[in-house]
Image (spheres, rainbow, N blue to C red):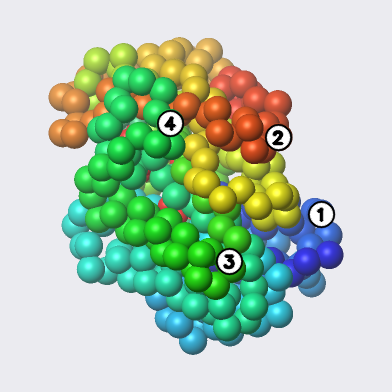
Amino acid sequence: MAEILVTGGAGFIGSHLVDALLAAGHGVCVLDNLSMGKRSNLPLDNPRLRFIEGDVADAAQVEQAMAGCDAVAHLAAVASVQASVDDPAATHQSNFIGTLNVCEAMRRHGVRRVLYASSAAIYGNNGEGLAIDEDTPKAPLTPYAVDKLASEQYLDFYRRQHGLEPAVFRFFNIFGPRQDPSSPYSGVISIFTQRAQQGQPISVFGDGEQTRDFFYVGDLIELLLQGLFGEVVEQPVNVGWNQAVSLKQLLAEIGALCGGLPPVTHLPARAGDIRHSRADNVRLRAHYRLPQQTPLREGLRQLLGL
Ligand code: NAD
Ligand code: UD2
C-alpha cells in the first residue's frame, strides 16, 4: 500500500479521490488551506488519513507534507477563473507557485509520480465547436489558464530534467456531489440543481443552446487512480466524453428528476462565453481504461441525493 499526498484534498474532486484511496487501503496526506475545501468533506477519524491545514504556496509546508509520500495528486488551486481575473497575483501563488513547490519537494524527496489537474481553459476559444484534441493550439485567455499551462510546462521540465512522472489531465466540465454552488461562477450543474431543489429562480445566460461535455466525478476518480498507479503516460490527456449536452437538455433532465423547475429566466450571454465545448478523447481512450459512463441522469440523481 502506498502513501499519497493529495493537495486540495478537502475540495470537490480531491475529497472523492481521498475516499477512493482510503477505500483501496492506501494512506493519504491532505494538504489544503480550506479556502474552498471543507473539513466535513474528509473522513478525519480514519487513522490512515493525515490532514495538514496549509498552503501549497508555502514551500516549507509542502516539504513537510511530502515527507513519507510515494506519489502526489496535485489538485490544489483557486478553481474560479473569475477570481484569477480579479486578483492574478494572489491566485498565481496557489495556481503556479504551488505547482513549483510540489515539483521541488518531489525532487528533494525522490518522489516521481504526480497527477496534475489541468483544464480545458488552456485552449481558450480555439477549436470551439469542434471536438478539441490535445494538439489544438493553446490560447490561455485568463490568469487561471496561463497558470495551468505554465504548470504543465514546468511539470514537463521536471520530467525531462529530474525524472518526474507527471500524469496530466485536462478536465472539461466535471460535476457531482460536493461541488460548491455558492459563487455565480460555480459549475452550472451545481447551481441549477441547488436552485431547483430550493425552488429559487434559475438564470440561463444566453439562449440555453450552448453545450458542454459533462463528466461525472465518480468516473473521473477511476481515471485519476490509473494516473497515480498505472503506466506512465507522458502526454497530457483531455478528460471528456466527446458528448455535447445543451443547457436546455440539462434543465429538462433536472426538471424530470425534481418534478418540475422553478422559473427560468434568460439573461444576455456572458462575455467571452464559449458556445460549444467538447473534448476529443482519442488519446484518453488509447492510454486509459475508460470507466463505464455514468449517464447524466444518474449523475444528477446522485447529486440531488435521490
Ligand atoms: P475545489 O475548489 O473544490 O478544490 C480545490 C481545493 O484546493 C479546495 O479544497 C481549496 O481549499 C484548495 N486550495 C486552493 N488554494 C490552495 C492553496 N494555496 N493551498 C492549499 N490548498 C488550496 O475545486 P475542484 O473543482 O475540486 O478542482 C480541483 C482541481 O481541478 C483544481 O486544480 C481545478 O483547477 C481543477 N479543475 C476543475 C474543473 C472542474 O470542472 N471542477 C475543471 C478543470 C480543472
Ligand atoms: C468551465 C470551467 C472554467 C474553465 C472553462 C474553460 C467550471 C465551473 N468552469 O467554464 O473553470 O475551465 O470551462 O472552458 O468548471 N451558466 C448559466 N447560468 C448559470 C451558470 C452558468 O447559464 O447560473 C452557463 C454559462 O454561461 C456557460 C455554461 O452555463 O455557458 C457552463 O458554465 P460553467 O461556469 O459551469 O462552465 P464553463 O464551461 O463556462
Residue wearing tag 2: 289
- Label 1 near label 4: C-beta < 8 Å? no
Q: Quadrant of ligand 2?
A: top left
Task: Please state which of residues 291 and 305 is positioned toward the viewer in this rendering.
Answer: 291
Residue 141 appears in the rendering? yes
Q: Residue 222: horizontal and vertical position, in percent?
A: 69, 42
Q: Which residue is mark 1?
A: 24
Q: Is residue 36 left or right of residue 257?
A: left
| Disc 3 and disc 1 in contact, CB within 8 angstroms | no
In the displayed structure, 198 sits above or below 80; it is above
Work out how far the residue at label 4 is from the one at label 1, CA to CA, in angstroms.
32 Å
Which amino acid type is shown beneath numbered disc 1?
Answer: Ala
The three-letter code of the residue at mark 3 reads Leu
Say which label, 3 or 2, has the lower sequence index: 3
Q: What residue does disc 4 label?
A: 133
Check disc 2 and give the amino acid type: Arg
Lower position in the chain sequence, tag 4 or tag 1: 1
**In front: mark 4 or mark 1?**
4
Quarter of the picture containing the N terminus is bottom right
> Gap in Å between the C-alphas at discs 3 and 2?
23 Å
Describe the element under mark 4 as helix, strand or loop: loop
